[in-house]
Image: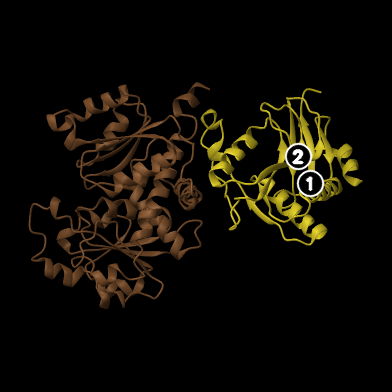
Chain colours: A brown, B yellow
């Protein structure tokens, strides 16, 4: 593995390797010395063209726990706001010797361009590109599902997961649908027709417009935030109406089987896609998702940077 | 023993069995006795095996100590992959499970257990890993086989068998928990 650009690039073995590695690395969090020397002397650049607090901090903690040096490059306070292109930014980072670039960009495909254009030698990790993909989020969701609903090992064969909300603008939904399929689980996306992307029928999942009908038959439900910042048109009549038809409240939580868990990638809009009492219930595992995110990102950085580089291997 | 017989019966000149199942059992019991003797009992002892086979050796030694001393000894596993000094010389390695007993290692006597002691680099990594987990009162080292060729100033406190080898030779430890039988053999070499 040289880059992590899409959850669709992972086969069962490589996905399970990341999950298993994360399971071993999770124990570091419980120690008094939360640090491993593994990536000492390597540099990880967080290249964030879009606002993100939790993903950037999660990657930063993960890299620091592995002793890598971390540079945060936030577009708003950098030369990008002065009109620099992605290419010139990349060439600058390359000249400064970045071993890995973690990129978040509002344009779908920016990480792919960065990885394949030959501007940089290092590994590229997609931390969310436009409405395309967010593979580490899908991996941490799979890790959380595996921990709660399987015995913490192997794949997710037979698991049924509902993904509810703004599928159209959600890179989390896309990555999750691809990874869940790879791991043998079955996903159902639930949303009003206006918030489903064109071509969703070709995705490897079922599609439903009716949340109440889906909930009794799933092992986990993943609520997504309605991304109003990406909406240039009216996709639903009102917040209230959306919430009434697609929000997860106490009554709907009661429709779930007793073992089912509730996930949310954050940030949550309490009262919109999820009610406050559901968000605070014991079945909601948001805090675990955040903790697992650090382990997953440590695993990804270790697997990308921990061993011999791809170029050295060719030289052998 | 019949293993000596099977050895001469079907393996070529490049492979010789140096310890059979009986020898390994005796070596483990002797190491267990030595650990108890050195530490004047088994109180405060923690045996940490280095994956893969060190972990099985650790539980066997612990069972043996329990027979000798009547005391139950804490056993764990310590994966040192993330502390190795040769990570960048090889493709990325998969991690093995670590399991540190709930009591922690602070103020305990930790006995590291590995199957083969060779360059000493694994043990160097283990000492670094241990340092991040806590501060043991003492650290000791037990190895089933010491094959020499140390590259660091590290020595074992308890050795099952000292085995002079050539660098080109490979020492292979098989344990019934992981392999098909209990056996230590020397393979390869230029003879």
Q: Foreground residue, A89 or A291?
A: A291
The crowd level at tag 1 (other Cα within 10 Å; few <14, some 14-19, many 20+) is few
Quarter occupied by residue A82: top left
Q: Secondary structure at mark 1?
A: helix
Disc 1 marks which residue? B38
Q: How many marks?
A: 2
Disc 2 marks which residue? B157
Taking the spot 42% from the left edge, 49% from the top edge, the residue there is A295
Q: Foreground residue, B26 or B141?
A: B141
Taking the spot 60% from the left edge, 46% from the top edge, the residue there is B78
Residue A216 in the image: above or below residue A19: below
Say which chain tag 2 marks: B
Quarter occupied by residue A99: top left
Which quarter of the figure is the N terminus of chain A placed in? top left
- Whether residue A180 is visible, yes or no, is no
- Residues at circles 1 and 2 in contact by the CB criterion of under 8 Å: yes
> Where's residue A24, x and y in %?
51, 49
The crowd level at tag 2 (other Cα within 10 Å; few <14, some 14-19, many 20+) is some
Work out how far the residue at label 1 is from the one at label 2, CA to CA, in angstroms. 9 Å
- Whether residue B21 is visible, yes or no, is yes
Say which chain tag 1 marks: B
Q: Foreground residue, A109 or A198?
A: A109
Quarter occupied by residue A51: top left
Residue B136 in the image: above or below residue A152: above
Taking the spot 76% from the left edge, 35% from the top edge, the residue there is B146
Q: Nearer the viewer, mark 1 or mark 2?
A: 1
Q: Foreground residue, B134 or A275?
A: B134
Q: Is residue A257 left or right of residue B189?
A: left
């Amino acid at each position: 593995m040289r880059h992590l650009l899409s959850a669709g690039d992972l086969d069962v073995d490589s996905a399970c390797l990341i999950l298993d590695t994360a399971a071993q690395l999770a124990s570091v969090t419980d120690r008094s010395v939360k640090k491993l020397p593994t990536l000492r002397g390597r540099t990880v650049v967080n290249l964030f063209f879009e606002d993100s607090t939790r993903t950037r901090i999660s990657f930063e903690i993960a890299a620091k726990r592995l002793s890598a040096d971390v540079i945060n490059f936030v577009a708003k306070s950098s030369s990008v706001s002065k009109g620099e292109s992605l290419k010139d930014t990349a060439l600058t980072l390359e000249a400064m010797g970045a071993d890995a670039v973690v990129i978040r960009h509002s344009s779908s495909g920016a990480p792919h361009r960065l990885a394949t254009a030959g501007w940089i030698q290092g590994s590229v990790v997609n931390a969310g590109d436009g409405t395309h993909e967010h593979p580490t989020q899908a991996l941490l969701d799979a890790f959380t599902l595996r921990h709660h609903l399987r015995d913490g090992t192997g794949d997710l064969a037979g698991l049924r997961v509902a993904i509810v909300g703004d599928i159209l603008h959600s890179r989390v939904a896309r990555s999750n649908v691809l990874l869940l399929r790879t791991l043998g689980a079955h996903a159902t996306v639930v949303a009003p027709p206006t918030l489903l992307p064109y071509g969703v029928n070709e995705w490897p999942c079922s599609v439903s417009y009716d949340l109440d009908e889906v909930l009794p038959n799933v092992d986990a439900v993943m609520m997504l935030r309605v991304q109003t910042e990406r909406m240039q048109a009216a996709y639903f009549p009102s917040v209230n109406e959306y919430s009434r038809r697609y929000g997860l409240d106490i009554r709907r939580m009661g429709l779930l089987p007793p073992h089912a868990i509730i996930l949310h990638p954050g940030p949550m809009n309490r009262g919109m896609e999820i009610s406050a009492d559901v968000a605070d219930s014991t079945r909601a595992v948001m805090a675990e998702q955040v903790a697992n995110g650090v382990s997953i990102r440590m695993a990804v950085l270790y697997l990308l940077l921990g061993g011999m580089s791809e170029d050295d291997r060719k030289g052998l | 023993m019949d293993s000596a017989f099977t050895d001469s019966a079907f393996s070529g000149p490049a492979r010789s069995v140096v310890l059979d199942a009986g020898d390994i059992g005796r070596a483990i019991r002797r190491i267990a006795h030595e650990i108890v003797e050195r530490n004047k009992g088994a109180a405060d002892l923690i045996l940490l095996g280095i994956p893969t086979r060190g972990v099985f050796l650790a539980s066997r030694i612990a069972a043996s100590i329990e027979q000798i001393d009547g005391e139950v000894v804490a056993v764990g596993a310590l994966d040192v992959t993330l502390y190795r000094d040769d990570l960048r010389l090889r493709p990325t390695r998969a991690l093995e499970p670590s399991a540190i007993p709930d009591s922690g290692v602070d103020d305990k006597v930790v006995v590291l257990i590995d199957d083969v002691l060779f360059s000493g680099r694994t043990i160097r990594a283990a000492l670094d890993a241990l340092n991040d987990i806590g501060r043991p009162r003492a650290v000791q080292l037990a190895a089933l086989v010491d094959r020499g060729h140390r590259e660091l100033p590290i020595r074992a406190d308890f050795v099952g068998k000292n085995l002079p080898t050539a660098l080109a030779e490979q020492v292979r430890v098989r344990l019934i928990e992981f392999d098909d039988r209990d056996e230590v053999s020397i393979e390869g070499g230029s003879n």
